[in-house]
Image (tube, rainbow, N blue to C red):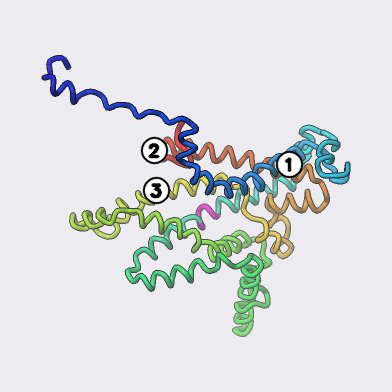
């Protein structure tokens, strides 16, 4: 540095480090943003963090009728440590529910998770904005239907007295009752989930596609890259961070495949096919007032989900992706 002329030594000095603002200064600067966040923070506090204190029930023989109020029931219920978990892990019905839940999750990861991506790619290729808006509205409209309506529509189509069964009978063929067949139940619920929610999930990938620079496609086309090469080298790499993020979140939700869809169809196909952890918590915990067992099953779900999220996020870091949080 000493060999450089003085004018160059002056310009080569390090840029001054910006002064760190104090907490009060940052509070005065950002108070409107913090004020806008208060409603969401209040909702999280009231409906997520405060109810999480109820996990103490998993370690008690909880009796809601002890004492004069719910707080006294927490205090005076008998503390049994891991007794509820011992009962849970020794119960074959619990492991049947875990097995069904994991089987459904893995099946839907393979056959349901790619559907919104494919829909987004197909819809993004439609050139007419009006036709694209029409198709998008029709595809994601079923998301707003309740599961009662979805199951009823499938019953009218695929049930024993449904349209397809009646058409087969009129043709002299054996009628199929898909709605009560436990062997095809996993295909049925996956089809229902695709019809109801695939269009809604497509919106996230459409937003990711809109963020890709169109200049990349123009440059690739000018270099002679065809449609499939542009898809492989531009579109899919642009979608990769969103795909990995949603995949991590889905893995963290692996033990939560839903409640209403299954409880509506559980009696039709039987417990062996339709019992998942959410219905197990209801029928083995709440319905028979074994509150501690139900809370233990819920806490088990939460711990396993947390471990899956952390593990999947570490794998994402190894592949150079940010995941749901960055490395510390």
Q: Which quadrant, please, contains the N terminus?
A: top left
Lateral position of residue 76 relative to residue 168, left or right: right
- Give me the residue at 35% from left, 68% from top: 126
Q: Is residue 313 above or below residue 259?
A: above
Nearer the camera: disc 1 or disc 3: 1
- How far apart are the alpha carbons under marks 2 and 3? 11 Å
Question: In front of the other: label 1 or label 2?
Answer: 1
- Mark 1 and mark 2 lie on one chain; the one further toward the N terminus is 1
Residue 55 lies, in percent from the top left, at: 72, 40
Nearest the eye: 166 or 284: 284
Q: Is residue 69 magenta?
A: no
Q: Which labelled disc corresponds to residue 54?
A: 1
- Judge the density around disc 2: few (<14), some (14-19), many (≥20) Cα neighbours within 10 Å: few
Kindly check if marks 1 and 2 are in contact, taking CB atoms under 8 A apart as contact: no
Write the start and end of the magenta stretch as one range: 108-112
Q: Nearer the viewer, residue 164 or 56?
A: 56
Please tell me which residue is depicted at 57% across the width and 46% down the height of the picture: 38
Query: Which residue occupies the foreground of this view, 150 or 145?
Result: 145
Q: Under tag 2, what secondary structure?
A: loop
Query: Residue 206 versus residue 76: which sits nearer the camera?
Result: 76
> Would you say residue 111 sits in the magenta stretch?
yes
Residue picked out by circle 3: 240
Q: Which mark is residue 320?
A: 2
Label total for image: 3
Quarter of image, res 149: bottom right
Marks 1 and 2 sit apart, C-alpha to C-alpha, by 38 Å
Q: Secondary structure at mark 1?
A: helix
315, above or below 270, in the image: above
């Amino acid at each position: 540095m000493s060999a450089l002329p003085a004018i160059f030594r002056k310009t080569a000095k390090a840029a001054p480090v910006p002064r760190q603002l104090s907490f009060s200064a940052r509070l005065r600067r950002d108070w409107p943003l913090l004020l806008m966040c208060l409603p969401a923070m209040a909702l999280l506090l009231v409906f997520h963090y405060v109810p999480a204190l109820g996990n103490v029930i998993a370690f008690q023989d909880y009796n809601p009728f002890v004492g004069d109020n719910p707080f006294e029931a927490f205090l005076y219920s008998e503390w049994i440590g891991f007794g509820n978990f011992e009962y849970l892990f020794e119960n074959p019905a619990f492991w049947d529910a875990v097995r069904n839940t994991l089987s459904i999750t893995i099946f839907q990861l393979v056959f349901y998770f790619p559907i919104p991506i494919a829909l987004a790619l197909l819809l993004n290729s439609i050139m007419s904005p009006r036709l694209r808006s029409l198709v998008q509205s029709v595809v994601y409209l079923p998301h707003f239907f309740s599961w009662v309506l979805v199951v009823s529509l499938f019953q009218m189509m695929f049930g024993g007295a449904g349209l397809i069964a009646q058409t087969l009978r009129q043709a002299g063929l054996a009628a199929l009752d898909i709605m009560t067949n436990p062997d095809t139940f996993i295909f049925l619920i996956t089809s229902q989930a695709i019809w109801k929610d695939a269009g809604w999930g497509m919106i996230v990938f459409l937003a990711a596609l809109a963020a890709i620079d169109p200049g990349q496609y123009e440059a690739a086309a000018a270099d002679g890259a065809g449609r499939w090469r542009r898809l492989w080298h531009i579109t899919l790499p642009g979608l990769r961070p969103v795909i990995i993020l949603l995949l991590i979140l889905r893995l963290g939700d692996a033990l939560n495949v839903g409640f209403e869809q299954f409880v509506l169809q559980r009696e039709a196909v039987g417990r062996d096919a339709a019992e998942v952890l959410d219905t197990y918590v209801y029928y083995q915990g709440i319905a028979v007032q074994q509150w501690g067992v139900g809370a233990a099953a819920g806490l088990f779900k939460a711990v396993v989900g947390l471990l899956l999220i952390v593990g999947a996020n570490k794998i994402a870091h190894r592949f150079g992706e940010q995941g749901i949080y960055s490395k510390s």
